[in-house]
Structure formats: structure tokens, C-alpha cells
Amino acid sequence: MEHNKVPKLIILGSSNAVPDEQHENTHMVLVGQQRSVLIDCPGNPIRRLGQSGVDQQQITDLFLTHYHPDHVSGIGLFLMDAWLLGRKDPLRIHGLPYTIDRAAKQMEFYDWKTWPNFFQVTFHRLLEDEMVLAVENEEYRIFTSPVKHIIPNIGLRFEGVQSGRVIAYSCDTEPCPEVERLASGADVLIHEAAGASYGHTSPAQAGEIASRSGARSLYLIHYPTRGADPEQFVREAQNGFNGPVSLAKDFLELEL
């Protein structure tokens, strides 16, 4: 491993469930030298990865946070396109049992076991506990914790081994103590800002969560992009948080 190269988290999409021309549905990729991890899989991830300079062959793992269409609609396309592009390396898919069971059933509807010379896919069902260590290598660790959404869902915490930096991601959730503990002392908290409603969080609430968790900076994600003023979301979050607040825009890169 080249120690001068640090892992980076690339935001592939930042929109809520209804994207626009400049914003894809929320998903991201953690790029490392040994393992690169795609987090959620909407739209056509092959295209979005390519625009970020990441080849699908680099992806060793796929995390599915929860089974809503704006987070999982591209699973079939991602697997099929990787196969058509000649992928041979295995792929690990991680998620809660609720999520993995549905993803596996989705692929059964595509009759994927009839695809000749298809690469190996293994499903890893995560415990629905806090701070579950899901991935660990020389570059980073990934922890998962359940969050409070409409259906079972997880947030993630990324810890850089060499740098000691921490990035936490709330995923879709109402304000809940699990997110605050997941983001405790994080250098960056990426928190959803879809609006205060069942299963979601407002920008102002996201700012308060960042403050209570002791995060050093806040990026808002999964925010409305159609007919909205996203910069207003930043101002709302700043009311409850004294640190830097920014919008997580498509193709933003954060070093871990």
C-alpha cells in the first residue's frame, strides 16, 4: 500500500428521492487502495462511478443502507453492467437482513443465476446493533448503527487508520441518539436534510445533532433539489451548529 495515498469518500449523488439534472439520488463511494466500497446503488452507478474516475472493477463491497427505491433501484443494472464489462472479481453486499433478503429476491426476479460466467456475489447480513464493525483493513474501518427511518436502516462511520480522521453518515433518519453516538467526535458529519417529517430530519435539526455529537463540521445531504433554495438549508443548520456547514454536492471528495 502506498502510504501517501489516503482513502477518499466521493459523493456520487446528493439529492433526496426526487433528483434533478444536477443532482443524482444520494449515494457515495469510499475509494481505497485495497478495498473500495459503494454505499447505496440508485440510478446507474456504473455511469456515475465513471464520471468520478472510479472503475467498477475497483468496487469490492456494496453497502445497502435500506430498501427504498432511491437507494437500491440500480442494483440489477450495476451487477449486470459489471458482468457485461467482464468483471471476474467477487463482490460482497452488506446490509441488514431485512434489506439483504429483498435485494436477493430482486435479483431472483431477474433470473440472475442463468447469466453465464457471472462473478461471485456474497451477501453479508449485518447485526442490527450499534457500532457493528463491518469492514476493517490497513486503510480504514467501517462501523454501522441502526437509525430511525420508516423501515430498517443503517448509518455508517468511517475511520481512517493512518490519519485518525472520522466521517459519519446518518443516512435517512429522524433525529435519534444512535446518530449522535455514531458521529461522536467526528471530523465530518454528513447528515440528511430532507425536512422534518416521519423518518427524516430538517436542516435545523441536523445542525443541532452535529452540535450534540461534537462533530467538527457538517455537510447536508439528501436535501430537496427541485424548486428549493439549498443555501437556505445551510443557514438553517447554522442556527444550531457553530462549526462549518456546507452542502454535500455531487462529486464532492472528502479525504479520510
Image: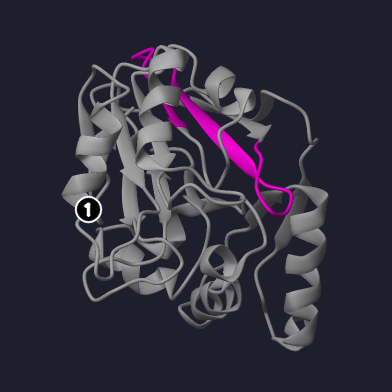
Residue 29 is inside the magenta segment: no
Between 179 and 138, the residue placed more toward the observer is 179
Residue 31 shows up from this direction: no
Question: Which residues, given as a range, are shown in magenta?
Answer: 147-168
Q: Position of residue 201 (x, y in %)?
A: 48, 43
Q: Position of residue 22 (x, y in %)?
A: 21, 69
Q: Quadrant of the N terminus?
A: top left
Residue 208 visible in the picture? yes
Q: Residue at x 67, y 47 (%)?
A: 153
The structure residue drawn at horizontal position 70% and vertical position 49%, both measured from the top left corner, is: 95
Residue 177 on image: x %, y %: 62, 23
- Name the residue rendered at 24%, 70% in the picture: 227
Question: Label 1: which residue?
Answer: 230
Q: Residues within 10 Å of mark 1 (few under 14, many from 20)?
A: some
Please tell me which residue lies in front, 97 or 19: 19
Q: Is residue 182 left or right of residue 241?
A: right
Instruction: Identify the residue at horizontal 67%, vertical 62% (top origin).
Output: 67
Residue type marked 1: Pro
Task: Indicate whether 24 appears above or below 4.
Answer: below
* Residue 49 position by quadrant: bottom left
Instruction: Identify the coloring.
Output: one colour
Dot 1 falls on a residue whose secondary structure is helix
